[in-house]
Amino acid sequence: MVTAAVDRITRRIQARSAATRSAYLARIERFGQRDRGADRMGCANVAHAFAALPAQDKLRVVVQRAPHIGVVTAYNDMLSAHQPYEGYPAQIREAARALGATVQVAGGVPAMCDGVTQGQPGMELSLFSRDTIAMATAIALTHDVFDAALLLGVCDKIVPGLLIGALHFGHLPCLFVPAGPMSTGLSNSEKSKVREMAAQGHVGRDALLEAESAAYHGPGTCTFYGTANSNQMLLEAMGLHVPGAAFVHPHTPLREALTREAVSSVLQRVRGAHYLPIGRQVDERVIVNAMVALLATGGSTNHLIHWVAVARAAGILIDWSDFAELSASTPLLARVYPNGQADVNQFQAAGGPGFVLRELMDAGLMHDDVPAVDRRGLRAHGELPVLQDGQLRWTALPPDSGDAQVVRGAAAPFSASGGLKLLTGNLGRAVIKVSAVPEERHIIEAPARVFSDQESLQRAFKAGELDRDFVAVVRFQGPRANGMPELHKLTPPLAVLQGKGFKVALVTDGRMSGASGKVPAAIHCSPEALAGGPLAKVRDGDVIRLDAVAGTLAALVDPVEWAARETAVIDDTAAEDNAHGLGRELFAGLRRNVISAEEGACSWM
């Protein structure tokens, strides 16, 4: 039984989504009732589809009617998180053949690294890469000869994009196959100190590059708890991984065993009595489970955009009010950087996702009666995978945390709420992650300093113009304006100013994602400035009050004056810069058609 709060919010989502969810289920039911692709399609279609298969595999899939798995991969060897996928197709084919099934890599999807593009023009393609990945997933699966799909992706927009794409093929059983985190390097806190020193000019480029390279140093995901690693937590909570697969290192025997197990798990859900297509698996309860897992671990604020879009892809309608109400009753059970000092390897060693999910289910904070790809159900995700005599097994986790500074039980959490707040007021609707922000910074009231890009703020900082209490209003950073880039370049200068004792905060219609930390940041302001949102009314010197306790965000301007004030427009030069160069022209249609951040910033609605 779930708590009254979780039950109430789940029922509200079900009621709100009744029409769209019913229509979605009817569509996938129609597709799921068709004959197998090799039986249904014309002979020329079948010949083209399987022309490159080895003869034995052709015999299996066409004549013997063996189950056929499509693999959609985000492999490239530029992203550390996706480099390990190079050898996965061979492992998956070998495992499938041993089980009498066949496999084809159906297609690849683009995968960009926000760490590489931070503060660069390419960052303006980042959010829209999610929908591009969803479309690429659809292109791969639309060959329509598959009985199931395995999805190979880890990082920020890649997992939501693959999931949105897969949900549009909701009649197929689908499972994600992760690659795991890199080993621990220079600690995140030490890296941040060097960044702040560099921002002040105390160390040069050589020292900064040395620190960054010591932090990001090998294959696997970055080890802070940003969007990529939050993805893995949410997939565990949704039952879309082999249980416990999230944070096992790449290129290890246990990782390979989990990859092979993914083949067995998805095949168990193909046809027959245990048929479980992803469109039926991902229901309103599973979406709520993902939201709770995010809140309980202080995960990435990006998912207040991405999981709204994921839910929409399954005919489910959620909004930021749902997140905020769940946050109020969800205890914070993990402190992982930037929400603490530990990295994901320490999180895993202390109990990891399995410990958190078990605690949440035992406390009635998650629906444990939902189906999962693993036939043992979601409870299996509260256990730990191990290799015993070369065989993959699952063992019960200890009753207590392995490190109470990193993970705690539901009876003694770090805080009683999940640390996410919805802010409303005459500046629109925004969100703030307060779990990493000291309590004395939860309320900031100071004059506004208005910027139209993060470079302008950095120039003002370097010129010494910001040594004062102020609220940085960085606008024209929403989806329609320039693709809603992450604004991580603002963190070091604002952290330096905060460290000097000034009261500072950020208010923006852009993103900060899972790396936002100790500086109060009201982000995703909606409607965005380019759409006539109220941030476009703010002027230098307006007193802004960000109150994360009361949940308000307001310009303290006379209401009559505020109502009469004209909205600023984006500078022509800035608009031109945002529209051209490094491929940005190709995304003009997405910028024109995108809906608001709170609606998931979808370009396909």
Image (tube, grey):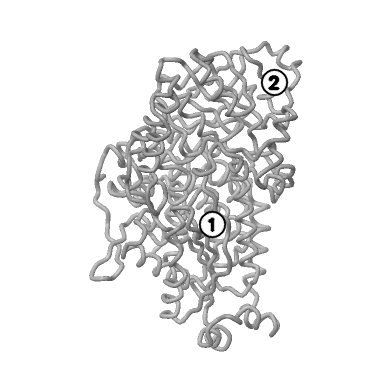
Please tell me whether residue 360 is drawn above or below residue 557 in the rendered image.
Answer: below
Residue at x 64%, y 22% (from the top left corner): 426
The residues tagged by marks 2 and 1 sit, at their Cα atoms, a distance apart of 41 Å
- Indicate which label's residue lies in the foreground, 2 or 1: 2
| On screen, residue 375 above or below 331 | below
Front residue of 383 and 521: 521
Give the percent coordinates (x, y) of residue 278: 54, 62
User: Mark 2 highlights which residue?
Assistant: 537
* Position of residue 276 measured from the top left corner of the image (x, y, whole percent): 52, 67
Label number found at residue 246 = none
> SS at mark 2?
helix
At a point 42% along the width and 66% down the height, the residue shown is 375
The image shows residue 131 at horizontal and vertical percentages of: 63, 51
Amino acid type at image mark 2: Lys
Does 350 appear above or below 482?
below
Mark 2 and 1 residues: CB-CB less than 8 Å, in contact?
Answer: no
Callout 1 secondary element: loop
Q: How many marks?
A: 2
| 218, 50: nearer the viewer | 218
Question: Residue 29 lies in what quarter of the image?
Answer: bottom right
Q: Quadrant of residue 137?
A: bottom right
Decide: few, some or many residues near mark 2? Use Cα within 10 Å; few <14, some 14-19, many ≥20.
Answer: some
Of the numbered discs in the image, which one, if any, rests on residue 282? 1
Q: Earlier in the sequence, mark 2 or mark 1?
A: 1
Q: Quadrant of residue 283?
A: bottom right
Residue 226 percent coordinates (x, y): 45, 42
Local crowd size for mark 1, using a 10 Å CA cut-off: few (<14), some (14–19), many (≥20): many
Name which residue lies at 72% across and 27% down.
Answer: 571
Name the amino acid, label 1: Val
